[in-house]
Amino acid sequence: METPSISQSLVLIFLVVIFSETAHSDGYHGFLRCLTLHSQNYSAISDVVYTPDNSSYLSTLQFSIRNLRFTSSTTPRPLVIITPVLESQVQAVVLCAKENGMQIRTRSGGHDYEGLSYTSQVPFVVIDLMNLSEITIDVDRRTAWVQAGATIDQLYYKISHKSRTLAFPAGACPTVGVGGHFSGGGYGSLLRKYGLAADNIIDARLIDVNGRVLDRKSMGKELLWAIRGGGGASFGVITARKLNLVFVPETVTVFSVDRILEQNAIELIYRWQYVAPSLPTDLLIAISINKVNSSKTGEKTISASFSSLFLGHVYRLLELLKQSFPELGVETEDCTEVTWIESAILTGGYPTGVSPEVLASRTPLTNIYFKAKSDYVREPIPKIGFQKLWKLFYEKEVDMVQMNFISYGGRMKEIPESAIPFPHRAGNLYKFHYIVYWNEPQKDASNINWIRRLYSYMAPYVSKFPRAAYINYIDLDLGMNNEGNTSYAKASIGD
């Protein structure tokens, strides 16, 4: 076979590039033409379509990006962003993307850890559901319909306006969209009492690849099973879900106590592993490990923050702790009696005394660069495992690091792992959430390398064969190919 010359090769490459760009252009313009044909009111659809030529394109794209790693100019961007206000507009996008060979990324809150709800390596469009955020509460039936673009705290806020004794078992981070959160399970301070958010979803509205709107009856049991915990990927665009609301008392109690290494933190963490998963279901105690400056010496040390939500009064909580975890030394002054919605404000990171109206906002408390991972623990970790762990925390390459321990047991142990596609049930004592933050993009490599070494160190102490992970804490390191490159997910991700 004759070997082509350099000039012939350059011509070939040039033609391939031109062909690719032409295909992109044809698909892009074809997609926009298709939207007009499928939309009964073009002026309405044009109001929610943003292309790179639109002055609001970049601000619309970046409004819901919570990880600054994906705000650089080199991050792949969508050809079109659509922010539908009507379900029919979502149908049009699905049909036109299919017709023009474009993939869809679906975004509801933007907290996707690896940016998969708004990035891709192939031609794609983003459906940003922020305007589909209607919430309807039925107090008598203890149900709610919530559209996928609402945030967790908007849901909590709406429930609190209808009842002081109804709640929903979802997460704590205020601006997380329910669309992605519910798709992968969704957990929070009520998980030991009522399980996951996905465990309490009873119906949904889903637009499939053919543009059909399906509900519980028309989609069938298998698809309804899959979209409650299986990830917001390949099943369609979920526009709304029906929830079972749960009971909470009018008064709940929260506490948070900090213990540094010099205050016996390792002993308390070790003991917590045996206590927390066996506590009554009305009580959840979590731990957050941070690197801090000692108030006494000014030197770096490790702080363990033990925080809790108890569904009852403070006197009953203290009785339980004296029986089960006296070593922690929680006193009356460490505790605060509040309503459930006030507890959501506190666990969301807002200061004491803030009005519940703050929950209705989509403005995040902070945006920062970060990388995160997760693990499940099935057997208590020996003390030496924690003692050696701190050496990694003390390294100078990283400053803002956090390691969260979320206890299981209770209702999480009772629900069969086949009930929904979320298998982390009986046998898991608790879950780890590791996260490292930084403020400057040039620190990406050192921080990401650090958390990979942390993850490697933890391997002997966590679940094995397989090593489990939480789907909502998306970690593309788990999809590395043989060449060490990360493969982008090809599905539509839901947050």
Image: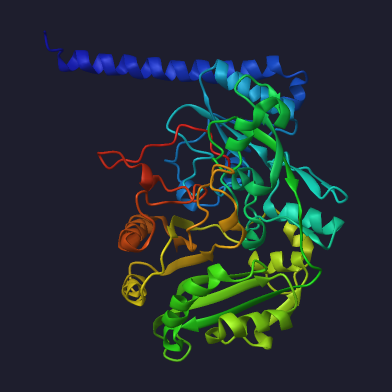
Q: Which of 59 and 287 is in front in this view?
A: 287
Residue 436: percent from the left, percent from the top?
Answer: 43, 62
Q: Quadrant of residue 442?
A: bottom left
Picture layout, residue 35 above or below residue 286: above
Q: Quadrant of the N terminus?
A: top left
For the C terminus, the image quarter is top right
* Residue 397 position (above or below residue 298): above
Residue 165 visible in the displayed image:
yes
Image colouring:
rainbow
Residue visible at 58% across and 46% down in the picture = 110
Name the residue rendered at 16%, 18% in the picture. 6
Compare residues 419 and 307 and report the one nearer the observer: 419
Query: Residue 183, image x and y in percent?
Result: 59, 42
Q: Is residue 439 left or right of residue 100?
A: left
Q: Look at the picture and state if 443 lies above or below 104.
A: below
Asked if residue 47 can be seen in this view, the reply is: no
Q: Residue at x 46, y 83 (%)?
A: 260
Q: Which residue is drawn at 43% across and 67% down?
A: 401
Count the marks: how many? 0
- Which residue is outermost to the right? 140
Relative to residue 223, is residue 142 drawn left or right? right
Q: Which residue lies furthest to the top in this view?
A: 1
| Residue 101 higher or lower than 316, as above or below | above
Residue 226: x and y, percent?
A: 58, 36
Q: Is residue 256 left or right of residue 36?
A: left
* Residue farthest along the bottom direction in this orientation: 296
Residue 170, x across and y down, in percent: 65, 55
Q: Which of 271 and 178 is in front in this view?
A: 271
Q: In this view, does 7 lie to the left or right of 401?
A: left
